[in-house]
């Protein structure tokens, strides 16, 4: 089954998106979010969706992060997709309030999505989480110790503040996403932190699951 067909079926089965909606799409520039954005753009004409890609610059990876932001902006210009880039200062927040770097980055990123959505009147946030992320999340929560609710993994949709977060790639595997990117010559960016074993999720991805 093609990635587009799989997205369509997931969207329809779980009622993720309705015609004529304005959708925020979180886009890092990596394979998952880029395939999601390209797929939603492909499906937009028949659904009359309005898409706004939002890229969050966490100010953590210097020139590499600058290049990611530029890549997403150029991609959106090429496909005539509305684009917003917002910066957050993760290290400053950690210095002032403490916490875990990845958790803080996620909190600040989601707040950016909420702020942009409020400004433009969007009510849906589409994210590129996929089937491999599900497996990693369940294992990570199991290793940390969790109840039955935690072992359920990442929901295909959920309410958050006044937004509904939806995951059209929920049933799609990473290798299918990478094949889609190759087929359409999307040339996604590769975040160097995804190969670091400093983080539990990447240790699970690189060492446990294989």
Image: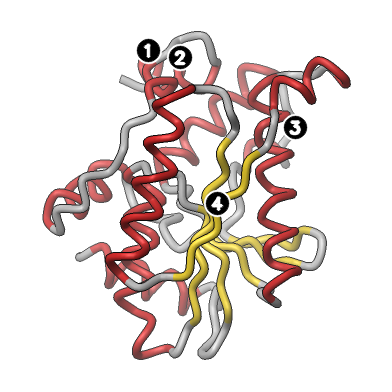
- For the point 61% across and 53% down, the residue is 155
Q: Pick the quarter of the image with the C terminus.
A: top left
Tell whether label 1 touches label 2 (CB within 8 Å): yes
Mark pair 3, 1: CA separation: 24 Å
Query: In the rendered image of this protein, does residue 30 appear above or below residue 122?
Result: above
Q: Which residue is mark 2?
A: 203
Q: What residue is shown at x 63% (from left), y 41% (from top)?
A: 87
Residue at numbered disc 4: 85
Q: Earlier in the sequence, mark 2 or mark 3?
A: 3
- Mark 1 residue element: helix
Q: Position of residue 151 (x, y in %)?
A: 63, 36
Q: Nearer the viewer, residue 182 or 75?
A: 75
Where the N terminus falls, by quadrant? bottom left
Residue underneath mark 1: 207
Counting residues from the start of the chain, the first of labels 3 and 4 encountered is: 4
Neighbours of disc 2 within 10 Å: few (<14), some (14-19), many (20+): some
Residue 108 vs 155, above or below: the answer is above
Mark toward the start of the polypeptide (4 vs 1): 4
Tell whether 125 sits left or right of 95.
left
- Residue lying farthest to the right in this orientation: 97
Quote the CA–CA distance across marks 2 and 1: 5 Å
Residue found at x 49% / y 62%: 83
Separation of residues labelled 2 and 3 (CA atoms): 22 Å
Q: Residues within 10 Å of mark 4 (few under 14, many from 20)?
A: some
Q: CA distance from mark 4 to mark 2?
A: 29 Å
Depth check, mark 3 against mark 4: the one in front is: 4
């Amino acid at each position: 089954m093609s990635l587009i067909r799989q997205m369509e079926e997931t969207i329809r089965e779980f009622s993720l998106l309705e015609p004529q909606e304005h959708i925020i799409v979180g886009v890092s520039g990596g394979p998952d979010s880029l395939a999601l954005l390209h797929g939603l753009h492909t499906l937009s004409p028949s659904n009359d969706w309005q898409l706004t890609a939002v890229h969050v610059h966490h100010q953590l990876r210097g020139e590499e992060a600058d290049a990611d932001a530029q890549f997403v902006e150029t991609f959106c210009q090429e496909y005539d997709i509305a684009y917003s880039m917002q910066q957050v200062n993760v290290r400053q927040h950690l210095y002032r309030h403490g916490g875990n770097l990845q958790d803080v980055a996620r909190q600040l990123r989601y707040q950016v999505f909420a702020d942009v959505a409020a400004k433009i009147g969007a009510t849906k946030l589409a994210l590129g989480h996929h089937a491999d992320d599900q497996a990693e999340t369940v294992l990570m929560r199991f290793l940390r110790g969790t109840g039955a609710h935690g072992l359920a993994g990442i929901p295909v949709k959920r309410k958050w503040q006044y937004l509904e977060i939806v995951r059209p790639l929920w049933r799609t595997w990473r290798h299918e996403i990478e094949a889609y990117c190759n087929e359409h010559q999307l040339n996604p960016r590769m975040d160097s932190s995804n190969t670091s074993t400093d983080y539990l999720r990447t240790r699970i991805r690189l060492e446990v699951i294989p």
